[in-house]
Image (tube, grey):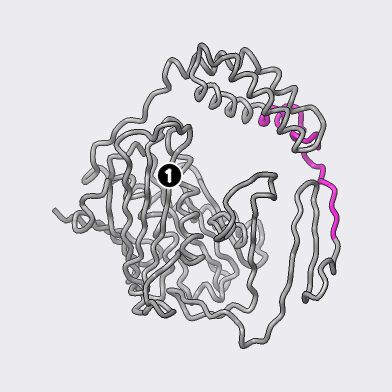
Amino acid sequence: MINQFEMEVGGRVLKFEHGRVADQAGGAITVQYGDTMLLATATASKKPKPGVDFLPLTVDVAEKAYAAGKLPGGFFKREGRPAAEAILASRMIDRPIRPLFSKTVHNEIQIIVTILASDGVNPYPAIGIVGASAALAISDIAFNDPIGACVIGLVDGELVVNPTYEELMTSDLELLVAGTGDATMMVESGGNFVSEEVLLDALELAQEVNGAIVEQITEIQSQVGKEKWEAPEVSEEEKAAEKATRDLVGEEFIKTLKTPGDKAGRQARMESVMDDTIEKLSEEHDPSHVKSSLYALETEAVRTTILEDGSRPDGRKLDELRPLNSEVGYLPRVHGSSIFTRGETQIMGVLTLASAGERQRMDSYGPETEKHFIHHYNFPPYSTGEAGRFGFTGRREVGHGAL
């Protein structure tokens, strides 16, 4: 049975359709805004993933060239690795949704948002968040906090809900807000300088719009949603392991965190405490439960130190900056280079200048654009003193590079 739902957002109709495609998915729904249309699916494994103490959630956005009536560039004429825009959109969907799952859910969960059609007028990222939220809401997955999302622009001094590509070109603000009916979960913004009053008005407007979207998704869930499996309760063994861990090293954790020193030394001391604790408690408690309790205790200790003592783990006060240092002209022959250091964090920037003919032409769903400034961000494993995968740019690097 096909079910359709409609609501007005920003003077345009936001349409939801369920029951026509992807019925085998845990939850599937199409969302249309103008003539931009996407399919959002949410599917989970039947059993928790063994040996994990985190939420194995993945979000993928599939941009299809056919959605804009184009062929992929290059010889093979087939979509390859996701473009930076798709990676950024997937991270944008992940951030507000991930915290809303119970900490006891360890099933593999995969959300896929496929762009089916693009009208070149309405951007899809906010719609993608709404679609992912709706797919989770109607699925059998233990997820009970649907969210809404919208973009607020400032065009000719007026706040605009979900501005078009054309409006964004002249907008002084591009504020994407995602949240439940009661709380804001994520804010991502760019633009020119605006007053605090305008920004607060934009946030209030976004929360109003998102609240209406959440109501609509809740209505859809009540009509077509599947019966959800329950998130597991914290077991008695986990509770016992947490109590034993807290009794054994609770005070020591805070003391270790407050010990002055560099990051590497502090981490080494923390790892030593963790290893000793796991060894002492492993006969009576599952080592994985002890390890999870230690990480939770570490988070709590850091929070307590900041809120009660007004100091950070490295000993700085809340308003104290790390030492700053910068230099330029570090590398020979290149067009430009610099090194910037803040505390123990260091970056090397390298600049290349080229003619306008080498500008990057962007394949996108909006107006054809060209990039004259290209920023590549790399985060090799040695940056944190670790050995790890080295090769293709990862999602984190794409996201941080965009920031």
Q: Is residue 365 left or right of residue 202?
A: left
- For the point 24% across and 36% down, which residue is it? 227
Q: Look at the picture and state if 52 lies above or below 235.
A: below
- For the point 55% across and 57% down, which residue is it? 394
Q: Is residue 234 left or right of residue 22?
A: right
- For the point 51% across and 60% down, which residue is it? 88
Q: Position of residue 99 (x, y in %)?
A: 48, 40
Residue 372 is drawn in which quadrant? bottom right
**Towards the viewer: 36 or 268:** 268
Residue named by callout 1 = 57
Is residue 315 covered in magenta?
A: yes
- Binning the other alpha carbons within 10 Å of mark 1 as few (below 14), some (14 to 19) or many (20 upward) gives some
**Towards the viewer: 318 or 148:** 318
Q: Look at the picture and state if 135 lies above or below 239.
A: below
Badge 1 element: strand
Residue 122 is drawn in which quadrant? bottom left
* Residue interval drawn in magenta: 302-326
**Towards the viewer: 40 or 293:** 293
Q: Look at the picture and state if 328 lies above or below 104.
A: below
Amino acid at circle 1: Leu
Q: Quadrant of the C terminus?
A: bottom right
Q: Position of residue 115 (x, y in %)?
A: 35, 65
Q: Position of residue 146 (x, y in %)?
A: 38, 45
**Towards the viewer: 24 or 118:** 24
Is residue 267 covered in magenta?
A: no
